[in-house]
Image: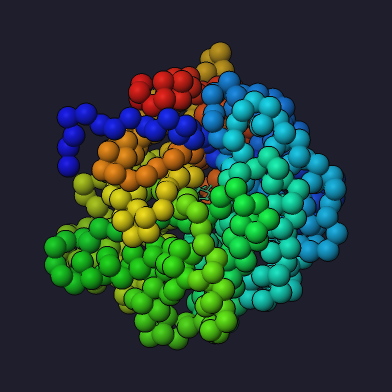
Amino acid sequence: MEYPQVTPFPSGFLWGASTSAYQVEGAWNEEGKGPSVIDKAVFNAELSDFKVTSDHYHHLEQDVALFAELGLKTYRFSLSWARLFPQGTGELNLAGAAFYDRLITLLVQYHIEPLVTLYHFDLPWALQEKGGWSDPATIDAFERYARMAFERYGDRVKYWLTINEQNMMILKGEVIGTLPPGTPDPQKALYQQNHHMMLAQARAMIACHQMLPTAKIGPAPNISCVYPASARPEDVLAANNFSAIRNWLYLDLACYGTYNAVAWSFMREKGYLPTVTEQEMALLRAGKPDFIAFNYYASATVGAEQSAHAREQGEPTRAVDQQLAGIDTRVYAGMNNPFLKRNQFNWYIDPVGFRITAREIYERYRLPLIVTENGLGAFDTLEAGNKVYDDYRIAYLRQHLEQLQLAISDGVEVFGYCPWSAIDLVSTHQGIGKRYGFIYVNRDEKDLKDLARYKKKSFAWYQQVIASGGQNL
Ligand code: BG6
């Protein structure tokens, strides 16, 4: 659909930017913080320094002042569960709690709405050692942690996110650290963990509504629209299967409190079915989100049979990336998409897919949407005068905002946009070399240099986008 005039971004639109605790804070063992699964992941230590990351913990005032200069209306960040409860449960670490008090108070002073993720991949190691999400006791620990956060910060925080990219943790559990490598029957274990996380999320949503009647809370999965590799009905079916397993399983549980029928049949067929009680399903139905937050980087394309398609297209099938996480070639096959360009890390760039994704989510659930991640990872170069000319990032964000505005024109209710990331931070899988921020942090993978902050060209661009309420893209 084309419009002679697109609908403006709504007034009060939450122009924002995102980070997560383990990727930006550093201070990994300071002032009482306990280790998380991320601190223990061997591949992280080999890849990059995850102990200091962007050292936001020690640059708090400077960073928030820069966010204010950027003009952010909201800042999405996560609380480090292990900074607050070093053992995952038990005693609150007051120094850790005070750090988030300072951050939230600063944001409020600058009129930046805090948007708080309770849990972004970094489960306290003490809980992991006791079985992590395989142990139902982690559900209780999460609820207790969430209640503490609502009680302590609820006077200043109106918007809450439960769990970041639960679907990625399940689909790539062994990579992210959700499941220890070598766990027997890993897929079955992961789907049981998924069920436990859903229960934890439902309890947090119920607690939030009880404790903070004017606050709003929602899930934050990674959602990508899925294209069939061709109009062949088998390919369309494969795309449909993948979308159910990758996307809707998670949102159907969060929004309707029901298991997606196709995903359920897939788990039954493969022997992955979680143990589920009627009481638990009642809890899932009772926990309701106020909105849906979603992260989008690119679309996915799948076909029915990898080998047949590879032959037809005369090109190799696609390597598994974030969009194709959890690919099960017995059900669908990740395919190349000749209509899309790729970034330096081989991820597709698909702004139109962003519009399609927003429409699909809204049509299914009819809840307001906020984008909590979208961005371009790239090898930035620091030029003379400490300049970074990241025109490629501006182009990516501009194209995605244009498509988001078209989605709004289509009738999709969107109340905010938080690109990844507010400031450079360590990528989950590809180190600090894969930068996403509006603000450059002067360090390399292992050489921490002076960690100075420099505004990139995209900083000035986004600043005027926000100042114009999205009129000057
Ligand atoms: C999302 C995560 O999966 O994508 C972030 O929520 C992550 O933590 C981001 O950093 C980009 O992925 P990557 O692998 O490029 O860091």
Say which of 348 and 310 sits in front.
Answer: 348
Q: Is residue 318 above or below residue 440?
A: below
Which residue shows up at 44% across the image and 73% down it? 258
> Which quadrant of the figure has residue 51?
top right
Say which quadrant the C terminus sits in.
top left
- Left or right, residue 47 beside residue 62: left
Percent of width and height locating residue 251: 44, 63
Say which of 27 and 88 sits in front.
Answer: 88
Which residue shows up at 60% across the image and 31% down it? 112
Q: Is residue 446 above or below residue 442?
A: below
* Whether residue 306 can be seen here: no
- Left or right, residue 417 beside residue 73: left
Which residue shows up at 21% across the image and 46% down it? 339
Percent of width and height locating residue 99: 77, 40
Percent of width and height locating residue 226: 30, 58
Say which quadrant the N terminus sits in.
top left
